[in-house]
Amino acid sequence: MENKEQSQLKRSFLLRRKKVRIAGYAPSLTDPLREIICYTESGGRLVLRNHPEHMTWYASADGRFFHLTKHGMREVAVCYGPAMARRVKSDYPVLIYDKKRGTSSGRKMCHHFMWEVWHGARVQGMEIDHVNGNKLDWRLCNLDLVPPSENRRRASILRRLRKGGIVPDDVEPEVLRRFFSRVSLSDPAEVMERSFRMMD
């Protein structure tokens, strides 16, 4: 059964220009900004930053994607699931930012797109890690740029601890970061459990 966040990802809705105030003036397709502040109809405040290459595509730190069109700022749903995984040969959620191309060059994994928006291009030889191990959580706070060996080490530790029911699924990424820095893959499960309990 999907949770509330997953169901929200499947929805796509339009933020009409008359309902959104952006930096004191209406957005322009010919003058995209690096960072803008949106005020939604409900009064929520969103800080959006655009992609360095795809200038009309924006992302917020909480993992939402937006496209600036002539009709206004539109929130875009991502594609994921078995069918999409077969098409793009990846089981990570994908953002389609160029439907006209119809090829892999018009798609990008969500966590890659998010990282590029807020931190620029990835360093060659490094990987983007989902700190809490959840591929559906590409919030900025849940992403780290790490070497492949560190990515595998973290994944192995999480698998061991979640198999024993030690680490809950909703643990905060910052807690896991501190935990990863304290333990080694060679530590016994009892030592890891004790270290995690001490994080509280």
Image (tube, rainbow, N blue to C red):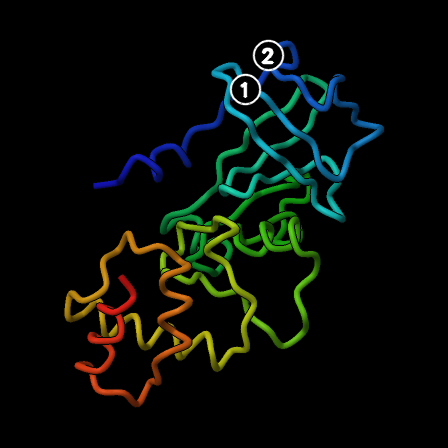
**Mark 2 vs 1: CB contact within 8 A:** yes
Q: Which mark is residue 19?
A: 2
Q: Where is residue 189 in the image (x, y as percent from the top left)?
A: 20, 81
Q: What residue type is labelled 1?
A: Thr
Residue farthest bottom in this picture: 186
Quadrant of the drawing holding the N terminus:
top left
Q: Which residue is found at the position 36% from the left and 51% from the top? A: 82
Cα distance between the residues tagged 2 and 1? 7 Å
| Of the pair 26 and 113, the residue shown nearer to us | 26
Q: Position of residue 200 (x, y in %)?
A: 26, 61
SS state under label 1:
loop
Residue farthest right in this picture: 30
Q: Is residue 80 above or below residue 198?
A: above
Q: Is 129 on the left or on the right of 26, as rendered? A: left
SS state under label 2:
helix
| Of the pair 130 and 106, the residue shown nearer to us | 130
User: Mark 1 highlights which residue?
Assistant: 40
Q: How crowded is mark 1: few (under 14 residues within 10 Å), some or many (20 or more)?
A: some
Q: Where is residue 151 in the image (x, y as percent from the top left)?
A: 46, 74
